[in-house]
Image (cartoon, helix red, strand yellow):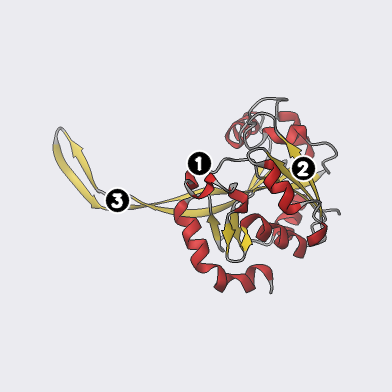
């Protein structure tokens, strides 16, 4: 089965400013590579043959760097948004998507095995599969519990855990029927629509490395860790 990936690379990277004033977020360097090149190299190593890059902000820089993908031995095509379409809206612009395809953000450093994730989705029969990760969030304050203006409890900098989307998804083509044409449509809106229609959405929990370099803290962590992680991620 042909493995096709759609990479969402059109964001403005507002959370990473001032880093992204000059470069689009997918070209932000991690070690000797831009983060998007790391992703593309991973996909090539895992037998993906086609990539569609959904681009908007500073699209020409991304096109100039990656070209047709021949440098990496993969076919790269581009889908240009002339208006912001959210995370899922760009899919409606793309022709000839296969029955099953990977969709992911272009700013993720992870050691997930994309090929396994692809195959698990196909076997599941779900219309949509989310790769999830447990994220810990610490509250940087002492949290008061009160009743009738009296203190009933106290927690010093408590930690909460959440199961969150990693920004990596597998889709079956019929999910496109739930996405409107020519309008912004996000992951959140699609999930609510699928839930309302009782469509099966699988969630695959992943416990390995996951850094979202759109977050300044994660970006700095990725820079610090990349030399140690490179062998594992890129098999070099």
Q: Residues within 10 Å of mark 1 (few under 14, many from 20)?
A: some
In the figure, 190 relative to 143: above or below? above
Q: Can see residue 103?
A: no
Which of the pair 150/96 is nearer the observer?
Answer: 96
Residue at mark 3 to residue at mark 2: CA–CA distance: 42 Å
For the N terminus, give its image quadrant.
bottom right
Residue at 71% x, 53% y: name it.
Answer: 65
Which of the pair 115/87 is nearer the observer?
Answer: 87
Give the side of residue 1 with respect to residue 203, left or right: right
Closer to us: mark 3 or mark 1?
Answer: 1
Residue wearing tag 1? 14
Q: Earlier in the sequence, mark 3 or mark 2?
A: 2
In the figure, 178 relative to 112: above or below? above
Residue at 69% x, 72% y: name it.
Answer: 235
Q: Residues within 10 Å of mark 2 (few under 14, many from 20)?
A: some
Residue wearing tag 3? 140
Residue at 64% x, 67% y: name it.
Answer: 233
In the figure, 217 relative to 191: above or below? below
Q: Can see residue 132?
A: yes
- x, y (%) of residue 152? 17, 43
- x, y (%) of residue 82? 69, 30
Give the side of residue 22 with respect to residue 171, left or right: left
Residue at mark 3 to residue at mark 1: CA–CA distance: 23 Å
- x, y (%) of residue 171? 73, 43
Residue 74, located in which quarter of the rendered image?
A: bottom right
Q: Earlier in the sequence, mark 3 or mark 1?
A: 1
CB atoms of marks 3 and 1 within 8 Å: no
Residue wearing tag 2? 78
């Amino acid at each position: 089965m042909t493995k096709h990936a759609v990479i969402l690379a059109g964001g403005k990277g507002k959370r990473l400013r001032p880093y992204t004033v000059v470069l689009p977020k997918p070209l932000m360097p991690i070690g000797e590579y831009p983060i998007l090149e790391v992703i593309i190299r991973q996909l090539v190593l895992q037998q993906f043959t086609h990539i569609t890059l959904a681009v908007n902000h500073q699209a020409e820089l991304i096109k100039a760097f990656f070209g047709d993908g021949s440098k990496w031995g993969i076919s790269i095509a581009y889908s240009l948004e002339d208006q912001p379409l959210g995370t899922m809206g760009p899919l409606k612009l793309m022709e000839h998507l296969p029955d099953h395809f990977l969709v992911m953000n272009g700013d993720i450093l992870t050691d997930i095995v994309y090929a396994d994730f692809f195959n698990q989705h196909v076997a599941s029969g779900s219309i949509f599969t989310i790769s999830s990760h447990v994220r810990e969030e610490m509250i940087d304050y002492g949290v008061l519990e009160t009743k009738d203006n009296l203190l009933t409890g106290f927690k010093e900098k408590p930690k909460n855990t959440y199961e969150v989307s990693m920004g990596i998804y597998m889709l079956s083509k019929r999910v496109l029927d739930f996405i409107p044409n020519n309008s912004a449509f996000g992951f959140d809106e699609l999930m609510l629509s699928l839930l309302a229609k009782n469509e099966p959405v699988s969630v695959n929990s992943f416990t390995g490395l996951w850094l979202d370099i759109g977050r300044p803290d994660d970006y700095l962590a990725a820079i610090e860790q990349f030399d140690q992680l490179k062998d594992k991620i890129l098999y070099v």
